Amino acid sequence: MTKPILITGSNGLLGQKLVTLFQENKIPFLATSRGENRLSNLPNENFISLDIQNAKEVEDIFEKIDVSAVIHTAAMTQVDDCENQKNLCIDLNVNATLYLSEICAKKDVFFVHLSTDFIFDGKEGPYTEEAQPNPLSFYGASKYFSEKVLQHTPNLRYAIARTVLVYGIAESMSRSNIILWVRKSLMEGKNIQVVNDQWRTPTLAEDLAMGCYLLAKHQKTGVFNISGIELLTPYDMAVATADFFGLDKSLIEETDGSKFQQTAQRPPRTGFILDKAMNEIGYKPHAFVEGLEILKTQLKN
Ligand SMILES: NC(=O)c1ccc[n+]([C@@H]2O[C@H](COP(=O)([O-])OP(=O)(O)OC[C@H]3O[C@@H](n4cnc5c(N)ncnc54)[C@H](OP(=O)(O)O)[C@@H]3O)[C@@H](O)[C@H]2O)c1
């Protein structure tokens, strides 16, 4: 029998999309997240509660279950929280990655790790995989350290999937994303201010799940950019969202980053060049408007 792929953080946005992808394609998997399973359509036999900060729990699970690969999505993902709670951020984003990578190396399990465009300073985006990181925030630094952990774990076979501003909808989400926030605000008739001086290649969560799966399936080692393909500002995204859902775009005020006081500094211009993932693993992201179409269907359901 084919060994399952283990997902960490299955209650999160990417984790849930991986569960759906694996269920739809009958790919054996084991979903794990801290606390209770929050996905209504995930049977108990496919879920084990796992707190990745607990090295013993991590080790125990690998002693009990033989897996082919790990897709490590769990992390402290709120950028400002990482700035305010640095110890917790290091524990979750770096130390937990160390526990997982050591056990994967020992058991010869392929490791797919999630990283971010926030490892860059945003001076020269869009970036290739070879660009030099220079994080501006503690979150970005923690993810850069986590990449270093993998690079320094002897005998580990791994891929790093770097991604950018992930959007989508899932059950009981612990955080929102720009599309859902813009849509909800405009539906409620609220005025919103959206910046026009940051650039990103926003990523449909389903595309990211597929990219991670392709890396695990082909066991391709190295760094891969896995994001959307269009370079857009948050303001562009907000206007496109308003147009797509037939909402009042006069409620959107174009502004720039200098008007906002945020705890963590954001890189101005990131975004990714995707040639490597497209050529080497057949990654094919949806266009932004196609992503909105997919989201619309899910919101109807
Ligand atoms: N979202 C983005 O825009 C973005 C951009 C670049 C990179 N990434 C990276 O992509 C990955 C997936 O992001 P996402 O959007 O799916 O994030 P998410 O929705 O915040 O999901 C992260 C999940 O990790 C879980 N988790 C946190 N601490 C845990 C622990 N100690 N043990 C087990 N599970 C734990 C969280 O559980 P709770 O739900 O219980 O809190 C949450 O469900 C992350 O590594 C992130 O850094 C995301």
Image (cartoon, rainbow, N blue to C red):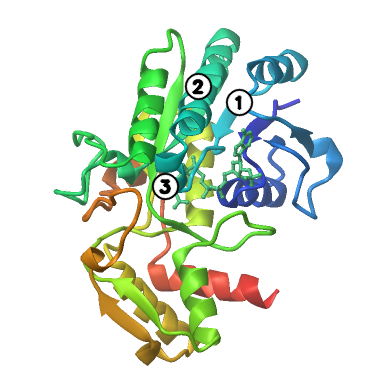
What numbered label is drawn on residue 200?
Answer: none
Q: Look at 67% across and 30% down and name the residue there.
A: 51
Provide the residue designation for mark 3: 79
Q: Nearer the viewer, residue 230 or 174?
A: 174
Looking at the rendering, the quadrant in which ligand 1 lies is: top right
Compute the Cα span from label 2 to label 1: 7 Å
Determine the image quadrant of residue 55: top right
Q: Is residue 23 above or below residue 147?
A: below
Q: Earlier in the sequence, mark 2 or mark 3?
A: 3
Provide the residue designation for mark 1: 53
Q: Is mark 2 within 8 Å of ligand 1?
A: no
Query: x%, y% of residue 9?
Result: 62, 39
Q: Nearer the viewer, residue 154 or 136?
A: 136
Secondary structure under badge 3?
helix
Q: Look at 66% across and 78% down and name the residue there.
A: 300
Quadrant where the C terminus sits is bottom right
Residue 225 visible in image: yes
Q: Earlier in the sequence, mark 1 or mark 3?
A: 1
Give the residue type at disc 3.
Val
Residue 218 visible in image: no
Query: x%, y% of residue 274?
Result: 30, 48
Crowd rating for badge 3 (residues with CA inside 10 Å; few <14, some 14–19, many 20+): some
Q: Is mark 1 within 8 Å of ligand 1?
A: yes
Secondary structure under badge 2?
helix
Compared across the picture, whether 62 is left or right of 276 comes to right
Query: x%, y% of residue 69?
Result: 59, 26
Compute the Cα span from label 1 to label 3: 19 Å
Quadrant where the N terminus sits is top right
Query: x%, y% of residue 161?
Result: 41, 38
Provide the residue designation for mark 2: 95
Give the residue type at disc 2.
Asn
Q: Mark 2 touching mark 1, by CB under 8 A?
A: yes
